[in-house]
């Protein structure tokens, strides 16, 4: 194992003044924190950057990241669409939508040619943030799409008409590398990989990068890894710091400087059905997702 990073204080995580010029403290990834500007509202809406949140391991913070990153980007004045592409419907629940009450979902949009996106997309309580919800019906699409011609491009086909209507589209993928996830990667410009700072999550990263490489080679050469995001980080444990160090050693600048720390507030936000940026806007967790939004927008300037 690499040598763990030193325990950081809050003072270490901010730029400091230096008579010899600007100097930045070291962040939790062991690198100097960038001084990113506050994103300004775009002059016009669209075309959208489509970003998939993907990791085949469950419980790594994909849905939490999709919801809160989407809300943080929406705060910058950008029009954001969040696509729940997991049959469990967790992203829908996290934004106050009950999946079993849905008359139409992303499943209908994929499988029925007479359904339009406007019939399925719902506004949320967050300004500039819309939702394309999902429920258990989506699990049937995995089987039914096998019979379709160009089955990997089904999601891309239904998204094409609404790309001009949004600045950023975030896809919350299911915890698998099946046909639904391949559809999400084929429809996307970029991919964000939430990675729990824990050894078993690290083991699956090689399998995921192999799948991404195959999609790039065979289906979507424009797909790029926007970044790898350390989640559920607890800097008090040697194990979490060692895992984060190893990821940075392997992927270097592909790893976001922002790290999402463990907090009891995330389960609370699921209960109330809103993102952390509105439930606890001044919390450390909300600040972390706003910092992540800055990094994502800096790496996807067209968004």
Image (spheres, grey):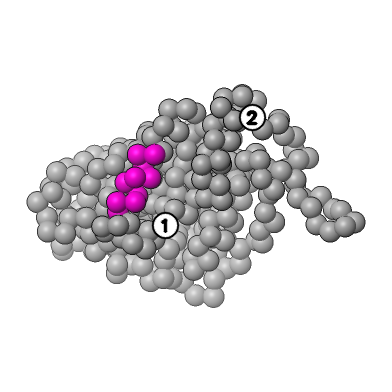
Mark 1–mark 2 Cα distance, whole angstroms, equals 29 Å
Q: Residue at x 26, y 59 (%)?
A: 219
Q: Residue at x 33, y 67 (%)?
A: 162
Residue numbers of the magenta segment = 206-215
Q: Nearer the viewer, residue 149 or 43?
A: 149
* Tag 1 and tag 2, C-beta contact below 8 Å: no
Q: Residue at x 52, y 50 (%)?
A: 254
In magenta segment, residue 211: yes
Q: Is residue 48 above or below residue 126?
A: below
Question: Which mark is nearer the camera, 1 or 2?
Answer: 2
Residue 4 shows which numbered tag? 2
* Residue 45 in view in this figure: yes
In magenta segment, residue 22: no
**Label 1: few (<14), some or many (≥20) within 10 Å?**
some
**Dominant secondary structure of the residues highlighted in magenta in the image:** helix
Whole-percent x and y of residue 292?
57, 50
Q: Quadrant of residue 142?
A: top left
Residue under label 1: 224
Query: Is 52 on the left-hand or right-hand side of 12?
Result: left
Whole-percent x and y of residue 49?
43, 63
Q: Is residue 89 above or below residue 234?
A: below
* Residue 119 in view in this figure: no
Whole-percent x and y of residue 205?
41, 38
């Amino acid at each position: 194992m690499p040598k763990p990073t030193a325990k950081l204080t809050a003072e270490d995580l901010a730029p400091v003044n230096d008579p010899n010029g600007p100097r930045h403290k070291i962040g939790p990834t062991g690198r100097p924190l960038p001084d990113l500007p506050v994103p300004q509202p775009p002059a016009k809406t669209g075309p959208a950057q489509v970003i998939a949140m993907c990791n085949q391991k469950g419980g790594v913070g994909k849905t939490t990241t999709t919801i809160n990153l989407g809300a943080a980007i929406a705060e910058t004045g950008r029009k954001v669409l969040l696509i729940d592409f997991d049959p469990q419907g967790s992203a829908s629940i996290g934004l106050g939508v009950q999946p079993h009450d849905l008359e139409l979902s992303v499943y209908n949009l994929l499988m029925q040619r007479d359904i339009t996106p406007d019939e399925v997309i719902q506004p949320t309580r967050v300004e500039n943030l819309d939702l394309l919800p999902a429920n258990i019906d989506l699990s049937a699409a995995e089987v039914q799409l096998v019979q379709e011609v160009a089955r990997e491009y089904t999601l891309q086909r239904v998204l094409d008409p609404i790309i001009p209507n949004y600045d950023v589209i975030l896809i919350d993928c299911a915890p698998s590398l099946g046909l639904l996830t391949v559809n999400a990667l084929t429809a996307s410009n970029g991919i964000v990989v939430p990675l729990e700072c824990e050894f078993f999550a690290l083991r699956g990263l090689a399998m995921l990068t192999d799948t991404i490489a195959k999609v790039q080679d065979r289906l979507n050469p424009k797909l790029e890894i926007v970044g790898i995001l350390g989640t559920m980080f607890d800097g008090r444990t040697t194990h979490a710091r060692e895992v984060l160090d190893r990821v940075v050693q392997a992927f270097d600048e592909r790893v976001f400087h922002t790290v999402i720390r463990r907090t009891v507030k995330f389960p609370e936000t699921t209960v109330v059905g809103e993102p952390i940026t509105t439930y606890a806007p001044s919390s450390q967790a909300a600040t972390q997702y706003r910092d992540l939004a800055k990094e994502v927008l800096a790496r996807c300037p067209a968004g």
